[in-house]
């Protein structure tokens, strides 16, 4: 019963994230095109550069995904994340439940993060807010968003393992998330 409920929650979160992408879609969010292309290439490379710590795969793409949601917006970030994670799941021939979790967690943290950033900080595509992107508060907002979305992503993945493999959520947090947090803070500082 718990497993069916969790799969239902994941499907709802993925659908809500995709709806967010459609609702927030603006062609100007993909401009400048060169930045969009560069972030896509870096994220694709980052998805291929990964390591596994216990049962969780860590990729170098997270930094690029956070930059995409903050510099371009939620729609480009969600699109990029879903395409790259979907391609990775297909390439690795992941179990459908694990592929769903990867898609759900990625799309959700990108949607939530992109919406929060756009609401909290001015739209970086707006001429009126161009000066704001040069401030310390803009950089600190990206740092905070990195840490928050990293925790959200971890929680969604850890919940999958708690529900399907019986790995206690708190134990995963103390054994995986907290020990890796200094590295994530260093990555966020970049």
Image (cartoon, helix red, strand yellow):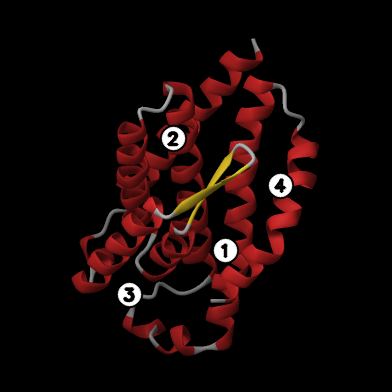
Q: CA distance from mark 3 to mark 4?
A: 37 Å
Residue 62 vs 11, above or below: the answer is below
Mark 2 or mark 4: name the one nearer the start of the chain.
Answer: 2
- Residue that carries the numbered disc 4 in the rendered image: 176
Which residue appears at 52% of the width and 88% of the height?
135
**Residue 159 appears in the picture as rendered:** yes
Mark 3 or mark 1: name the one nearer the start of the chain.
Answer: 3
Q: Which mark is residue 96?
A: none
The x and y percentages for residue 70 are 44, 67
Mark 4 or mark 1: name the one nearer the start of the chain.
Answer: 1
- Residue that carries the numbered disc 3 in the rendered image: 125
Q: Secondary structure at mark 2?
A: helix
Q: Residue 163's image quarter?
A: top right
Q: CA distance from mark 3 to mark 1?
A: 20 Å
- Mark 2 or 1: the one toward you: 1
Asked if marks 4 and 1 touch (Cβ < 8 Å), the reply is: no
Left/right placement of residue 75 relative to residue 34 reads right
Q: Residue 136's image quarter?
A: bottom right
Q: Residue 139's image quarter?
A: bottom right
- Residue that carries the numbered disc 1 in the rendered image: 146
Which residue appears at 53% of the width and 60% of the height?
116
Q: Secondary structure at mark 3?
A: loop
Number of residues whose C-alpha sits closer than 10 Å to that of mark 2, classed few (under 14), some (14–19) or many (20 or more)? many
Q: Secondary structure at mark 4?
A: helix
Asked if marks 3 and 1 touch (Cβ < 8 Å), the reply is: no
- Name the residue nearer the viewer: 54 or 12: 54
Number of residues whose C-alpha sits closer than 10 Å to that of mark 3, classed few (under 14), some (14–19) or many (20 or more)? some
């Amino acid at each position: 019963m718990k497993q069916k409920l969790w799969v239902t929650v994941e499907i709802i979160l993925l659908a809500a994230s995709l709806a967010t992408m459609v609702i927030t879609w603006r062609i100007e969010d993909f401009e400048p095109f060169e930045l969009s292309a560069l972030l896509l290439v870096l994220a694709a490379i980052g998805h291929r550069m990964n390591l596994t710590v216990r049962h969780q795969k860590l990729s170098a793409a997270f930094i690029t995904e956070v930059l995409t949601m903050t510099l371009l917006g939620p729609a480009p970030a969600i699109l990029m994340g879903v395409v790259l994670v979907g391609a990775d799941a297909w390439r690795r021939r992941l179990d459908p439940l694990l592929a769903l979790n990867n898609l759900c967690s990625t799309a959700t943290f990108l949607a939530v993060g992109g919406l929060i950033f756009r609401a909290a900080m001015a739209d970086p595509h707006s001429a009126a807010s161009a000066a704001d992107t040069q401030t310390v508060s803009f950089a600190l907002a990206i740092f905070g968003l990195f840490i928050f979305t990293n925790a959200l992503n971890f929680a969604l993945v850890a919940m999958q393992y708690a529900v399907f493999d019986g790995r206690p959520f708190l134990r995963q947090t103390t054994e995986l998330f907290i020990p890796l947090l200094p590295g994530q803070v260093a990555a966020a500082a970049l």
